[in-house]
Amino acid sequence: MVMGTGIALYLSVNRILFKNAGEHFQMVSQQVKDASLQVAEQAGRPVQYLPSPQKSKEEIARGIATEEQIADGLVCVLTCVEPCQTLVINRNRETKTQDIRWGQRKCLFIYHYHMHPELGLIHTRLQTWFPFTITVCLNGREWLARKMDACKLSYRKADNCFLWLGDTVRAQELAHEQLKTDWPELLESLARKAHPLYPKVFGEFRTQYYWTAYQTEWATDVMFKSAQDLNHLYPRLARHGITSFRSQAEIRCTANPGGCAPVPRSARASY
């Protein structure tokens, strides 16, 4: 049997024979899927399947939140079949044996969109096949806007950009407070809403999610005192923006249960 130490221990601790592993994985995956979707059912929120991953899930969620004036709580649950890294059972016809390897497949992902009172619109992305990877996505600018609202600071915002700030010094101080966040506590609380079976899903195998920054992007806002100053630099700024990566105030954190998943790249997970 060729597989990571974590999954081998998982099967051993839970007394699952290798020949029954495939059936067990499918059963547990279905339980995870049912429990995650039941969250929406209990909250009376819509569940929508998207036939293509290319469709903007955020636009759908924002549209629902705006139409129904949702200021707090679950907005909707969206599902979509997307590529994933999971366990693959290989059958060797020559040796008449089976082994478990990590490989690329496709499975159903469940997106829970929440309107958070402090973070704004966020979402969690749950892989419904082992090892049930979770990604949490939040927007730092929405977070800052909520903070400024609480402090009664004036500002103008268009889409994901601040056009004007009434108190730039205080706004910067509030932005820096994000660096003091207890990330494990925050992310665990968000993950449990989308994955209610965690950690019971792993049975007697004691494990927890290990959080890493999968995609973390910092954005810098440059403010000008006059339109003339901006007009002078605008052609060069536009060229730079077109030829470089688009900057977004967005944080994505991905978690895999320790020891139960491979490490495809260091930016995603480590153990």
Image (cartoon, helix red, strand yellow):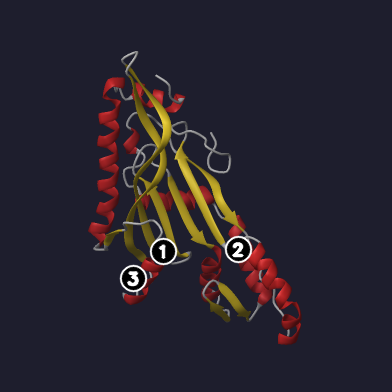
Q: Nearer the viewer, residue 171 or 76?
A: 76
The answer for how far apart the CA atoms under marks 3 and 1 are is: 13 Å
First-in-chain label (1 vs 2): 1
Pair 3/1: label in front = 1
Image quadrant in which you'd find residue 10: top left
Q: Is residue 17 visible?
A: no
Q: Secondary structure at mark 3?
A: helix
Which amino acid type corresponds to the residue marked 1 in the rendered image? Ser
The structure residue drawn at horizontal position 58% and vertical position 39%, both measured from the top left corner, is 266
* Alpha carbon separation for disc pair 1 and 2: 17 Å
Front label number (2 vs 3): 2
Q: Secondary structure at mark 2?
A: loop
User: Horizontal and vertical percent for residue 32?
Assistant: 29, 43
From the viewer's side, name the closer residue of 54 and 197: 54
Question: Which is more N-terminal, label 1 or label 3?
Answer: 1
Q: Which mark is residue 139?
A: none
Residue to which mark 3 is pinned: 64
- Tell which of 240 and 29 is nearer to you: 240
Residue marked by disc 1:
56
Name the mark on residue 246: 2
Q: Earlier in the sequence, mark 2 or mark 3?
A: 3
What residue sits 26% from the left and 61% below the top?
A: 43
Residue in the picture at 62% in, 80% down: 164
